[in-house]
Image (cartoon, rainbow, N blue to C red):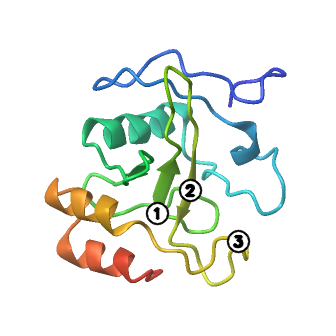
Amino acid sequence: MSSGDDPCPEHPARTRRRSLRYCFYIAHHGRGAADDSQWAVDLSEAEEFAIFDEADRHDFSDPNGNLYGLRRDEESNLLDLGTEGEQIAKFWDPGKNQPTHGFPLWPCSETGPENRKKQLAPKVALKKMLDARLLSRRQHDRLLKGKYG
């Protein structure tokens, strides 16, 4: 995690498709409120940005312009993104030439923070992930239903 007083240190690169800017909001890197989602400690800044870049490249967006990303291993198994078992990340619509940030959000375990329990990822974003073959039908259906395992 970048250091300093900047609450959202910016990544030096931009996304390949739309040249979007990204920053690492400290609230999601161990310096936020108790109910702020946290990126997994084994996820590097490079990996976090790569998830955002892939979400932009494939336009895994909802009707509001927010992007959604996931993390997979070499065998295409979904990996946790966050400290509460989240497997889908949300990246706010960055707006015009503004950096955005993301956070792990779906699905959360039954023991996760109250503000994120039982929330489901947007159907349209999951469908785009399925169509891009980044999710299997089983993974898509499980995430669509908010299944945790």
Residue tagged by mark 3? 115
CB under 8 Å between discs 2 and 1: yes
Which quarter of the rendered picture does the N terminus lie within? top right
CB under 8 Å between discs 1 and 3: no
- At x 25% / y 57%, what residue is drawn? 129
Give the alpha-carbon distance from disc 3 to disc 2, as whole Å. 13 Å
N-terminal-most mark, 1 or 3: 1
Q: What amino acid type should be assigned to the residue bearing mark 1?
A: Gln
Report helix, strand or loop for mark 3.
loop
Q: What amino acid type should be assigned to the residue bearing mark 3?
A: Asn
- At x 64% / y 71%, what residue is drawn? 116
Report helix, strand or loop for mark 1.
loop
N-terminal-most mark, 3 or 2: 2
User: Marks 3 and 2: which is nearer the front?
Assistant: 3
Question: Between 84 and 56, which is closer to the camera in this rendering?
Answer: 56
Report helix, strand or loop for mark 2.
strand
Q: Does 86 sit above or below residue 59? A: below
Indicate the position of residue 127 as horizontal and vertical percent values.
24, 64
Residue tagged by mark 2? 104
Report the label total.
3
CB under 8 Å between discs 3 and 2: no
- At x 43% / y 25%, what residue is drawn? 20
Residue 31 circle label: none
- At x 75% / y 44%, what residue is drawn? 27
Residue tagged by mark 1? 87
Q: Residues within 10 Å of mark 3 (few under 14, many from 20)?
A: few
N-terminal-most mark, 2 or 1: 1
Give the alpha-carbon distance from disc 2 to disc 1, as whole Å. 7 Å
Indicate the position of residue 51 as horizontal and vertical percent values.
41, 42
**Which of the 4 image quadrants contains residue 115?**
bottom right
Indicate the position of residue 37 as horizontal and vertical percent values.
68, 57
Q: What amino acid type should be assigned to the residue bearing mark 2?
A: Pro
